[in-house]
Image (tube, rainbow, N blue to C red):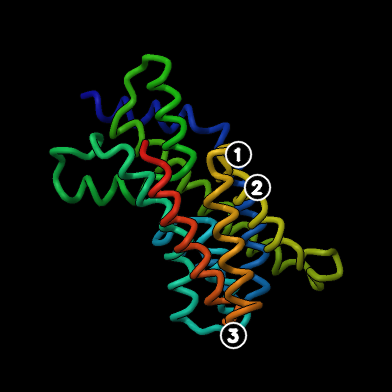
């Protein structure tokens, strides 16, 4: 069978990228602990959501007292880019049963998507199971790293005394940097920033909802200008 072999190949070849995921997974775990999350909660959240940026934004909204609805909407808005990512490889899902489409969409991240396209550019066969294998590896690493971060934070009496209150910001910066694909992303990113600033300064919108508006605007513009 080629499916297990392709999945194992994808999982093995994404290990170098998974190491980077582990680093900001630890940072997110430290942050989540400060927000009052337990190890089990963070582990379940990682398995269900499996999106670092969205988890950080949602946690920030909860810490800021924005409420569960605002937290969920903010996370979804930031994750809109994955609709564009999956649409760019729609032939990978063509003709597959619904459960494989759902599994593949859930396992698709910026890292294994980029790795799959890079391997295809080299003339190698890299399809659905290669993508899923890489995603499963990243999911395992992410969940283990975030739970480890929570446990580590709980073993420290005063996390803020060590400057760990900056962990959230550092984790978000790391994730944002990994999402930057070059100059072609400049316009959507600048648009998102401009919308957030205008909503807060001119419209008096709460920062949590301004971030949501900015994320939707940036993702929408990216969908228009990126036709690949």
> Residue extending furthest top?
123
Q: Which residue is mark 3?
A: 65
Q: Is residue 153 left or right of residue 202?
A: right
Q: Is residue 211 left or right of residue 85?
A: right
Which label sits on residue 150?
none
Image coordinates for residue 88, horizontal then vertical, percent: 33, 39
Residue sitting at x 50%, y 62%: 215
Q: Which residue is mark 1?
A: 19
Q: Is residue 195 above or below residue 1?
A: below
First in sequence, mark 2 or 3: give its number: 2
Residue at disc 3, secondary structure: loop
Q: Is residue 94 above or below residue 82?
A: above
Image coordinates for residue 82, horizontal then vertical, percent: 40, 50
Image coordinates for residue 10, horizontal then vertical, percent: 40, 30
Which label sits on residue 23?
2
Image coordinates for residue 164, horizontal then vertical, percent: 77, 64
Report the quarter where the N terminus lies.
Answer: top left
């Amino acid at each position: 069978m080629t499916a297990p072999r392709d999945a194992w190949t994808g999982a093995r070849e994404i290990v170098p990228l998974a190491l980077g995921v582990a680093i900001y997974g630890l940072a997110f775990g430290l942050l989540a602990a400060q927000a009052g999350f337990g190890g089990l909660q963070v582990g379940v959240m990682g398995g269900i959501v499996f999106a670092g940026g969205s988890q950080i934004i949602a946690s920030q909204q909860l810490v800021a007292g924005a409420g569960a609805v605002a937290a969920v909407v903010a996370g979804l808005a930031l994750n809109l880019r994955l609709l564009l990512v999956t649409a760019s490889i729609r032939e990978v899902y063509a003709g597959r049963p619904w459960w494989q489409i759902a599994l593949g969409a859930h396992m698709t991240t910026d890292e294994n998507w980029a790795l799959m396209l890079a391997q295809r550019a080299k003339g190698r066969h890299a399809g659905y199971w290669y993508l899923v294998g890489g995603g499963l590896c990243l999911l395992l690493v992410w969940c283990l790293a975030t739970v480890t971060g929570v446990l580590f934070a709980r073993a420290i009496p005063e996390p803020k005394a060590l400057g760990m209150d900056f962990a959230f910001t550092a984790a978000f910066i790391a994730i944002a940097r990994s999402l930057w694909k070059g100059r072609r992303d400049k316009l959507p990113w600048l648009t998102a920033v401009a919308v957030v600033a205008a909503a807060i300064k001119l419209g008096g919108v709460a920062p949590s909802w301004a971030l949501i508006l900015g994320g939707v605007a940036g993702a929408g513009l990216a969908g228009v200008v990126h036709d690949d």
